[in-house]
Every structure is written in structure tokens, then in C-alpha cells.
Amino acid sequence: MLNVDIVRFKNLSELWKGIAAVQRPRRYFAGGTDLVVLAKAGIGVPCTWVDLTPLKELKRIYEDKEAIFLGAGLSLLELEESDLVRRWAPALSDVFPEFAGPPIRGSATLGGNCANASPAGDSLPALYAEEARVVLERFGKRRELPIENFILGPRKTALRPDELLLGFSVPKRPHKGAFLKLGPRKGLAIAKASVAAAVVLEDGLVKKLRVALGAAGPTVIRSRRVEALLEGRALSSANIERARALAGEEARPITDHRSSAEYRRAMCGVLLGRILERFSRC
């Protein structure tokens, strides 16, 4: 039998007043879709788990003049249904139909998927492409980090002891975005490879481009060589073909039970090519 100790707080203020009294080691969780899996694997146990589900402060979604804010406790299904996400974070919006099935999307949270820091996590490439910033809080003091500085390695983040991931700030800018992934079964599978991209087009040329490769290295990889190649150029067939080759070169995947490194590298190029072809028709 698996024994898991769980504590809850009513709100964020109560959490900061009481967290120091919770037995160490302690870890946060929200949707909990990976909790039993991790516990059975011996990851994070023995420890006390702090359930963030009651915290309404983590379930807010709103906008100001410069950005939209997505609470870390929002379920993926709630985000999938958000007009703000569809309008201002199209690459992220593309993730949700590809993420597991509706029951999991109704429980899993964006914050949990990000803090899990899996190289194959579906939301991470899209957050990179959308230039998201993570909003963190520890004992009432807040700080922000670019998503690229938050993810340090497989299951490693820049979170400090007891620090909480409040949510994500995504800049508001008119652009196109897309996400594609490859897995053995649509939606239900962990990605063998994935690509997210966000583009600003002006007069038929790429004004700004962000490309992120998932399941292609120890962390999500920003495809900076592809970005440099295409910015200021048209999305012609020749340029797309060159970008596909560069993406494969930038990928640093591993070989494991799901796929070979060679196949993953090739598929990063294929997925990127499909996204760029879609952008070229905009």
C-alpha cells in the first residue's frame, strides 16, 4: 500500500503563514495526475505533499495592456476553452487537443506540467515559443523569470525551497502560432518529438520567429539558427527546406525505449516544415 501524506491550505495567505510548520521534506502538487506514478517510482517520497487545489489565486486568468496572465492552477481543459489563450497564445492553444484525453485535461494543470520539467512535456515548447515568463512567489515575495531560465534540466527547475509557481505571463502581440507532436497514439502518448513556433509576418516576410523543439534534448531547445535563418526572409519552399535541416542539426535527442535519436532528429525537421508551410499560407 502506498502511503502519501497530504496537507491543504484555504488560500495563499494561509499557506505562507503555515507552510513552515509542515513536515519536511515537502512538495507542492495541483492536479496530481503524476503524483501516484512519481510516488511509486520513488521520486519525491517520502515527503509531505501540499495540495494547491483550494487556492483560487492560482486559478485566475486575466489580461492587461501588455500581457495575459495564466494561473498555474488552471486545468488544461479550462485553458483550452479560453478565448484569451486562443487569441494571444495560439501555439499554446494548439497543445491542448493533443494532450492526453479530456479526463486528464480536466485535472492536469499548466503549472504542474511545467514544474514537472519533463523534456517531453507538451506545454513547454509552446511556452518557449510564446516567450512566457514564470511568476514565482515565496513567503509573499514575487519574482519573474523567462521560461528558458526556469527549466534547468530533466525534472530540474529554478524553484527555491518552498517557492510556488503562481502562473505565467504571456506577452500580447499579434502573431501566428502552432504546435505539432509525434507519438504512437494521438493525444494519449508521450511525445517522441514536438515542435512549437510563433511568427510575426509583415509584407510576406518573417519579422520575428520563435521555434522550440521538445523531446529533443535534456530541456526544450530554442532553435536559434532556424530563427536567424528565416527572420527577414520569405517562407519559400527553399527556405523551409533549409530550416528543416537546421532544426535536425540543433536537436540533441537521446535514444530510449520510445524512439531512436536519429528518428527524433529527423522528425523535428519534418514537424517544423509542416508548421512553416502552414504559416506560409497565412
Image (cartoon, helix red, strand yellow):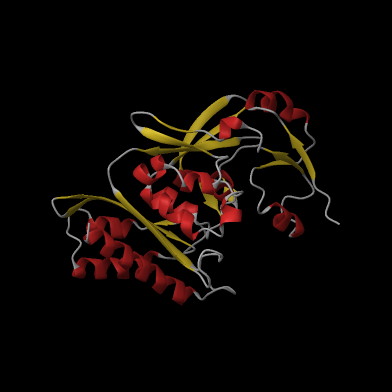
The N terminus is located in which quarter? Answer: bottom right
Q: Quadrant of residue 212?
A: bottom left
Q: Nearer the viewer, residue 266 or 6?
A: 6
Residue at the limit of the structure toward the left, as seen here = 203
Q: Nearer the viewer, residue 105 or 264?
A: 105
Question: From the viewer's perspective, is 237 left or right of 134?
Answer: left
Which residue is found at the position 28% from the left and 65% from the top? 243
Q: Is residue 91 visible to the viewer in this orientation of the structure?
A: yes
Tell me residue 252's x, y (percent). Answer: 45, 66
Which residue is found at the position 48% from the left and 52% from the top? 124
Tell me residue 171's x, y (percent). Answer: 36, 38
Q: Is residue 78 above or below residue 39?
A: above
The C terminus is located in which quarter? Answer: bottom left
Q: Is residue 152 above or below residue 234?
A: above
Question: From the viewer's perspective, is 183 left or right of 249?
Answer: right
Which residue is found at the position 72% from the left and 50% from the top? 44
Question: From the viewer's perspective, is 224 left or right of 214?
Answer: left
Q: Is residue 229 visible to the viewer in this orientation of the structure?
A: no
Q: Is residue 187 above or below residue 85?
A: below
